[in-house]
Amino acid sequence: MQNLYWFITISRRADSDTVSELYQELEVPRLYSSLAYGTAKSTLLDLLGLEQCEKVVHQTVVTHNKLHELIAALERRLQIDMPGQGIALAVPLASISNKKTLDFFSGGHAEDEMTEQKQMNPRAMELIIAICNKGHTEDVMEVARAAGAGGGTVLHAKGTGTEFAEKFYGLHLVDEKEIIYIVAKKDLRNPIMQAISEGAGPGTKAHALVFSLPVTDTAGFRFYDEEAAVKPENDYVN
């Protein structure tokens, strides 16, 4: 049986239809897309000659074989390995509920023989996810950048269960939320998460909750290596 991954592609909004068409051509059964925006500071955008644009976050479950087909296709069709074109990353799934769900996401290919693929810098990077109150993204990013983070991608969301939190924890939570995706080197994970927790965590107006997920494969980091700083790269690809 093939390994399964939560595969995330972050593209410019102008490329959204092209990404969706590519997924359809490769027979990916399900794709979930959400509007988002980047957090790069205007000074950096001016320096690089870039305009801040809306992003689209595309997410789905894929098999090992499909993962590598998608990465190759994204690099070929969208030049996603070039700065400013977007990024893609894969998070391994620990389990899936039942056979029907497995077939739903894999298109019936979960039992296909796995192709041999060499992974690029396995687990060298991690996906940090911060959930904060609406309007406080920059509070989170300010402390995250100070700890070594680059840019992030922000999705809007609506929280539930606030009555439970107020009753049992004495917290007043805002329903409107912002979810921030930050891709960072693994050795920067703890400093970034600690900075967010201390500078924008519970007890602050941002009330950010933060956790991280391992990343096995990436695309969109062509010019990234062990000696390069993460900050310039992430500031304009996220």
Image (cartoon, grey):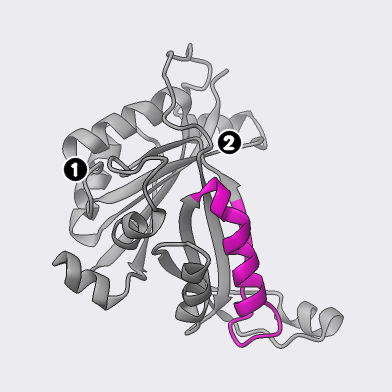
In the image, residue 230 lies at what x, y percent?
Answer: 40, 54
Give the residues in magenta: 185-212
Instruction: Inspect this view and state whether residue 194 appears.
Output: yes
Name the residue rendered at 53%, 16% in the picture.
111
The image shows a total of numbered marks equal to: 2
The residue carrying pointer 2 sits among few (fewer than 14), some (14 to 19) or many (20 or more) residues within 10 Å by Cα, namely few
For the residues labelled 1 and 2, the Cα–Cα distance comes to: 30 Å
Q: Secondary structure at mark 1?
A: loop
Between residues 111 and 187, which one lies in front from this camera angle?
Answer: 187
Instruction: Inspect this view and state whether residue 51 appears.
Output: no
Above or below for 29 versus 211:
above
On-image quarter of the C terminus: bottom left
- List the residue tagged with mark 2: 101
- List the residue tagged with mark 1: 78
In the image, residue 189 lies at what x, y percent?
Answer: 58, 54
Name the residue rendered at 51%, 36% in the picture.
5
Q: Is residue 210 magenta?
A: yes
In the image, residue 220 lies at what x, y percent?
Answer: 30, 44
Quadrant in which residue 120 is drawn: top left
The residue carrying pointer 1 sits among few (fewer than 14), some (14 to 19) or many (20 or more) residues within 10 Å by Cα, namely some
Amino acid type at mark 1: Leu
Quadrant in which residue 172 is drawn: bottom right
Name the residue rendered at 54%, 31% in the picture.
4
